[in-house]
Amino acid sequence: MNNELMQLYQQLIIDHGTRPRNFGEIQPCSHHQEGYNPLCGDKLILYLDIKDQIIQNAMFSGEGCAISMASASMMTGAIKGRHVEEVRTLFDQFHDLMMGEVDETEALGKLSVLEGVKNYPSRIKCATLSWHALKNILDGNKVIAKTE
Ligand code: ZN
């Protein structure tokens, strides 16, 4: 990745981290899930409204570092309006990206800006927190999503 692109990516993360989109609660909602990353102290609640297997709306509340907020902001934007099976695939692709198992995933679009985080192992959990909360909802688990 060249420097210019890297800077653009960082700006996007800072932008989403400081002014997160889809921030707030959905009341009532069909699903909500708490997520906690003890390593960094990030805490969030993910709210989804799922109807006919389609994610009608997705929002989150909570507090955490810029990476966790940016990731949740981008994730909620990416899953809105999608079928749950598509979102499962997206989770796997994002997970692979963070684990360094793929270099670049076109399907992830804007989400791939978080790829740079994989070079900072202690921050990977910040970026994957909201995704773990999402996975818990999709898998029907009621426990708090922890990153470890
Ligand atoms: Zn964090």
Image: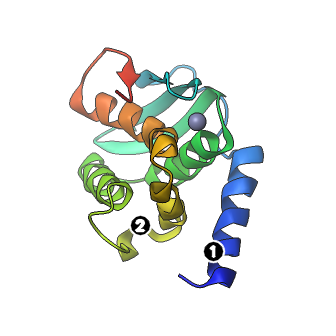
- The residue pinned by badge 2 equals 108
**Within 10 angstroms of label 1, few (less than 14), some, or many (20 or more) residues?**
few
- The spot of residue 88 in percent (x, y) is 26, 49
Looking at the rendered structure, the secondary structure element under dot 2 is helix
For label 1, the residue is 6
Q: Amino acid at mark 1?
A: Met
The quadrant of the picture occupied by the C terminus is top left
**17 sits to left or right of 80:** right
Q: Is residue 101 visible?
A: yes
Helix, strand, or loop for circle 1? helix
Q: Quadrant of ligand 1?
A: top right
Residue flagged by tag 2: what amino acid is it? Leu
Instruction: Depth check: give the residue in front, 33 or 146.
Output: 146
Q: Nearer the viewer, residue 112 or 24?
A: 112
Residue 102 placement (x, y as % from top left): 29, 69
Seen as rendered, the residue at the extreme top is 143
| Residue lying at 30% horizontally and 29% vertically, measured from the top left | 136
The image quadrant of residue 11 is bottom right
Residue at image location 30% in from the left, 15% down from the top: 142
* Residue at 38%, 17% in the rendered image: 144
Pointers 1 and 2 in contact (C-beta within 8 Å) = no
